[in-house]
Image (cartoon, rainbow, N blue to C red):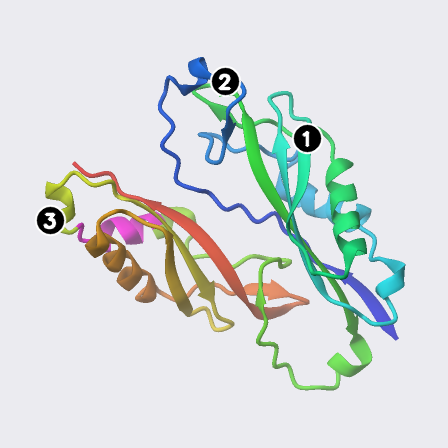
Amino acid sequence: MLRKLFCFCFLTITLVCSAQSDTLNKSDNMLFDDPEIEPQFPGGRDSLKQFLHRETVYPEKYKAQAINCLVVVGFTIEKDGSITDIYLLKETAGFVAFAAEAKRVVASMPRWIPGTMNGKPIRSKCSLPFRFEYVNTAQSDSQPYNDTTIYEVVEEGASYPGGINAFNLYIAKNLVYPAICKDKGLPGAVTVSFVVEKDGSVSRVKIIKGSTCREYNEAIETLMRKMPRWKPAMFMDKPVRTHNVIPIRVNIK
């Protein structure tokens, strides 16, 4: 018998932003990727997860095939918290019903608490991933667990031991900023993509938005690979591999 499973999580990908403090005065309609305070679903991430589980419906036409599908929806959160400009960032060709359902759910969301910059509400660009899955529990319970999928959306995300503050402390204590970069006054901000394996180890480290100083990017990659093991993500009460993105900023004195 097929059992319906929906596992959603708001995946926040924070991009490094170079907006200056006077930008708001120049354009009240500017869209920001990286506000000082991010927009928030009313009640927080747990409430968002509950909303998605409650509102999202697996398309009836695909149940017999037990199709698994990932859809990523982009949208704008306006200064009053309303949702506009809903569009698809990722879909699977030929399975339009999944994309339509994901866009419907985003359009039905209540007003968010808007992001802010310099203490003022701003328009923010956001994205939300939906993973639609059907699982044959009769088979999965009798077969060895050997899931090698790299998940984007899970029930419980991977976490660094001690949390984000401990991660920042690890970076601050162990990163040696290359003198060649410091002498040139190059910025110390990068965005890193990586996979947390089922055993908590880190693999597939890649700089997706780097500094112009190559030596600094290499130092960050090396440090990420040497990190302590993370607490792996959980899906269906089992550890799974997950793709993660995190920004790293270093204050150069």
Quarter of the image with the N terminus is bottom right
Q: What is the chief secondary structure element of the magenta stretch? A: helix
> Residue 240 at x, y = what percent?
57, 69
Q: Is residue 30 visible?
A: yes
The residue carrying mark 2 is 120
Determine the residue positioned at 41% across, 20% down: 23
Q: Is residue 22 left or right of residue 187?
A: right
Distance (Cα) linking label 3 and label 2 = 38 Å
Task: Looking at the picture, tell me which residue is in the foreground, 90 or 34.
Answer: 90
Dot 1 or dot 3, earlier in sequence: 1
Using the image, tell me which numbered label, if any, was put on residue 84: 1
Q: Is residue 242 magenta?
A: no
Determine the residue positioned at 14% across, 43% down: 182
Q: Secondary structure at mark 1?
A: strand
Task: Looking at the picture, tell me which residue is in the foreground, 37 or 33.
Answer: 33
The residue carrying mark 3 is 179
Neighbourhood count class around disc 3 (C-alpha, 10 Å): few under 14, some 14–19, many 20 upward? few
